[in-house]
Image (cartoon, helix red, strand yellow):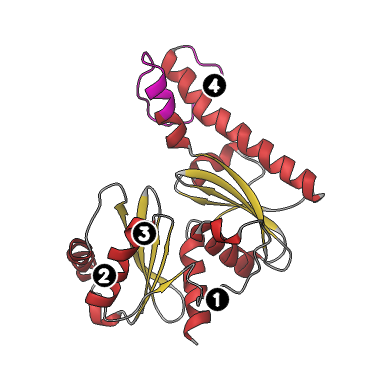
Amino acid sequence: MLLAIDSGNTNTVFAIFNDEGAIISQWRAAAKIAKTADELAVWLSQLMQLENISRDDVTEVIIATVVPENLFDLKTLSSKYFGCKALVVGDPDVELGIEVHVDRPGEVGADRLVNTVSAHKTYVGPLIVLDFGTATTFDVVGPEGAYEGGVIAPGVNLSLEALQRAAAKLPRIEIVKPERVIGTNTITAMQSGIYYGYASMIEGVIARIREEKELESLPAIGTGGLAKFYAPACRSIQNIDEDLTLRGLFVINAKNRT
């Protein structure tokens, strides 16, 4: 079995794949709470036991992280507790199977490259990957699977936290879909801004990418924690694929282990 680890700024996702590429189980840990390799091993082992999965069942580990300080403990987790050397997306000897057409390829986040690999494998053809993470990213995948660049915007929660910090009188709110665009009090006005304002930003950026690429029908695939939440307000999103990044890790691992 493969243990795939997607380490982001907000959450770290651990997923177990069988040899056919199906996800057996997956778990999330808050990235803001730093854990050593030993602490991660205790936490993960207990969750695996609940699913009747033994550590001995895991024979391969792959890691993608945008948080460099987490890498040492994740690699130690792999070697010390699973007895194998982890593949790390971004290492020079790890082949992704795609070209990266940007000014500085080394600056592209591992998650964005993994999403590109996965999206091209699953959907083929040129497309946009919209990832709702700590940042909201729009990544353009070329017809042959190349990463062609994209757009980075502040994530929904990040924007909301900044608004609350900068404006002393604004309260903390729950992110919900308001019934109306026009709010009649501070809370509903903020909720409208964070929902319909973001939806409009998403629609606008996708429209501009399509115009620039001269492809009006360029598909957009949504992934990340808030993708389903925003999809009803974003007609430009054709599909929601919550496991896009994890499947990309499986594809990359298979390519490099053979």
Under mark 2, the amino acid is Leu
SS for callout 3? strand
SS for callout 4? loop
Under mark 4, the amino acid is Arg
Residue 135: where, in percent of width, then height? 49, 43
Which residue is more in the foreground, 227 or 44? Answer: 44
Which residue is more in the foreground, 110 or 11? Answer: 110
Under mark 1, the amino acid is Glu
- Side of 205 where 113 appears, left or right: left
**Whole-Å distance between the Cαs marked 1 and 4?**
48 Å
Badge 2 or badge 1: first in the primary sequence: 2
Which residue is more in the foreground, 141 or 241? Answer: 141
Reading the image, the residue beneath label 3 is: 13
Residue 176: where, in percent of width, then height? 44, 31
Reading the image, the residue beneath label 2 is: 77
Reading the image, the residue beneath label 4 is: 180
Tell me, yes or no, whether the two marked residues, 3 and 2, touch with CB atoms within 8 Å: no
Question: Which image quadrant for residue 79?
Answer: bottom left
Magenta highlight range: 162-184
Residue 192: where, in percent of width, then height? 51, 24
Question: Which image quadrant for residue 65?
Answer: bottom left
Q: Measuring 38% from the left and 57% from the top, which residue is drawn there?
A: 68
Badge 1 or badge 3: first in the primary sequence: 3
Vertical comparison of 234 with 168: above or below: below
Vertical comparison of 201 with 183: above or below: below
Under mark 3, the amino acid is Val
Reading the image, the residue beneath label 1 is: 95
Badge 4 or badge 2: first in the primary sequence: 2
Q: Nearer the viewer, mark 3 or mark 2?
A: 2
